[in-house]
Amino acid sequence: MKNTDDMVFKIKADFLRALSHPVRLQVIEYLKDGEASVGKLVQDLGVEQSSLSRHLAILRELGVLEARQEKKNVYYNLHDHDIFKVLRPIAELLRKKLKRGEKLLESLAKE
């Protein structure tokens, strides 16, 4: 059973590691409202196409994104919006942590 547990933890860790790059998180947020071409992503996110292509490939392999080609353009879309069931609670935890830090700074400023 330990080997199975180890495998499960490794799969989870690999999934979270793949999400742990700022550009990948930007792409996911950007695509929450619908698909976009690679060119549009490059333009709006300000990321070089070669770099963006690597991140898109990782997210695609992870099963987060799907792609379709139309003539010379490749369009990406979220495969499953349930990804936000993972990302939103993380954002909430970070908001709480930030508030605690702000309260600490306020109390330090009063001293």
Image (cartoon, helix red, strand yellow):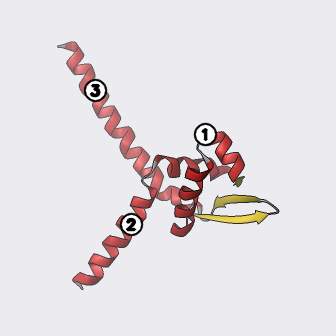
Residue 94: x and y, percent? 37, 42
Check whether the beta carbons of the residues at disc 3 and disc 2 lie within 8 A of each other: no
Amino acid type, callout 3: Lys
Kindly identify which residue carries mark 3: 103
Real-space CA distance between mark 3 and mark 2, rounded to the nearest whole angstrom = 35 Å
Front of the two marks 2 and 1: 1
N-term-proximal mark, 2 vs 1: 2
Name the residue type under label 1.
Answer: Gly
Name the mark on residue 46: 1
Q: Left or right: where does residue 42 sit relative to residue 96?
A: right
Local packing at callout 3 (Cα closer than 10 Å; few below 14, some 14-19, many 20+) is: few
Q: Name the residue located 54 percent from the left edge and 69 percent from the top edge.
A: 61
Q: Residue placed farthest to the left in the image?
A: 111
Q: Position of residue 68 (x, y in %)?
A: 73, 65
Q: Amino acid at mark 2?
A: Asp
State which quarter of the image contains the N terminus: bottom left
The residue under label 2 is 14
Q: Position of residue 44 (x, y in %)?
A: 66, 40
Residue depicted at 67% across the width and 41% down the height: 43
